[in-house]
Image: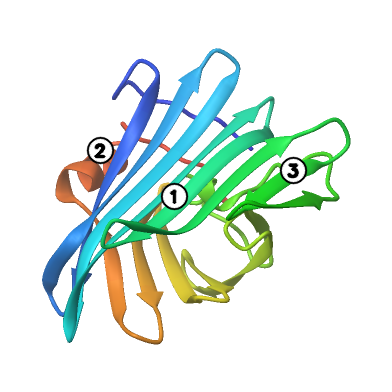
């Protein structure tokens, strides 16, 4: 995992995305990368309003911290109309990771997780790269589908990520109930193109 920081903030960087469906905004996603001492934290938060007959307020939040390139802790939740639908907690123990999903504790037989879904907005993946998802409790695999484009399939559906200068600029999200996109906002895109915000590439 390569750490490349610019001067947008002393300790971190923030990416702002519009969530678009049928050419209309339905919410926003904010992704932060924060360096504090020898710990690196990624924090992703998405808030959307989706109308499928009824109006649904949806929030998804993921926060994970790495130390010396190794995942040491994480929390996540998603809500529907203010009601928690799923909640996760993850922590590195001496010889394994403890993962708690909705109060149910499991052990992940890994001593060092170095790649996780929380990083993928700041790091361009490669074909067949594995990233760990605490939400699903297992690894997911990327597949290269185009120039700077990578597909990631989970039990929920498929996301296709597009990158520029190592930063994710667009995500096409396909679900059974809808298809929508995360589009990097113009001010964030300008910072990426001016290399004020930088990420890891495969070059």
Query: Residue 156: percent from the left, percent from the top?
Result: 50, 75
Asked whether residue 19 is in view, the answer is yes
Point out residue 92 in the picture as x, y percentages from the top left corner.
74, 34
Residue at the spot of label 1: 121
Q: Is residue 19 above or below residue 38?
A: below
Quadrant hosting residue 142: bottom right
| Relative depth, front residue between 64 and 119 | 64
Q: What number is the disc on residue 186?
A: none
Q: Which residue: 61% across, 49% down?
A: 116
> Which is more N-terminal, label 2 or label 3?
3
Does residue 37 appear left or right of residue 8 in this picture?
A: right
C-alpha distance separating marks 1 and 3: 25 Å
Q: Is residue 184 or residue 43 the one in the foreground?
A: 43
Q: How far apart are marks 3 and 2 (CA)?
A: 37 Å
Q: In this view, does 176 lie above or below 134?
A: below
| Comparing labels 1 and 2, the label whose residue is closer to the camera | 1
Residue under label 2, please give it: 191
Does 168 sit left or right of 74 as displayed? left
Q: Are marks 1 and 2 in contact (CB under 8 Å)?
A: no
In this rendering, the label closer to the viewer, 1 or 3: 3
Mark 3 and 2 residues: CB-CB less than 8 Å, in contact? no
How far across and down, in percent of the image, does residue 75 sit? 53, 42
Q: Which residue is drawn at 56% across and 50% down?
A: 88
């Amino acid at each position: 995992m390569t750490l490349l920081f610019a001067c947008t903030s002393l300790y971190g960087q923030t990416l702002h995305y519009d969530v678009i469906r049928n050419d209309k905004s339905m919410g926003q996603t904010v992704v932060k990368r924060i360096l504090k001492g020898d710990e690196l934290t990624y924090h992703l938060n998405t808030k959307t309003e989706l109308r499928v007959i009824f109006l649904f307020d949806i929030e998804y939040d993921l926060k994970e911290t790495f130390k010396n390139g190794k995942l040491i802790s994480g929390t996540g939740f998603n809500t529907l109309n203010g009601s928690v639908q799923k909640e996760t907690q993850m922590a590195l123990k001496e010889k394994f990771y403890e993962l708690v999903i909705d109060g149910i504790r499991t052990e992940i037989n890994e001593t060092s997780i170095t790649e996780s879904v929380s990083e993928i907005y700041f790091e361009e993946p490669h074909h067949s790269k594995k990233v760990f998802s605490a939400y699903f409790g297992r690894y997911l695999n990327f597949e290269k589908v185009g120039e700077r484009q990578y597909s990631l399939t989970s039990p929920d559906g498929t996301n296709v990520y597009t990158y520029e200068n190592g930063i994710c600029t667009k995500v096409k999200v396909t679900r059974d109930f809808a298809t929508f996109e995360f589009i990097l906002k113009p001010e964030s895109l300008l910072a990426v193109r001016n290399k004020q915000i930088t990420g890891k590439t495969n070059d």
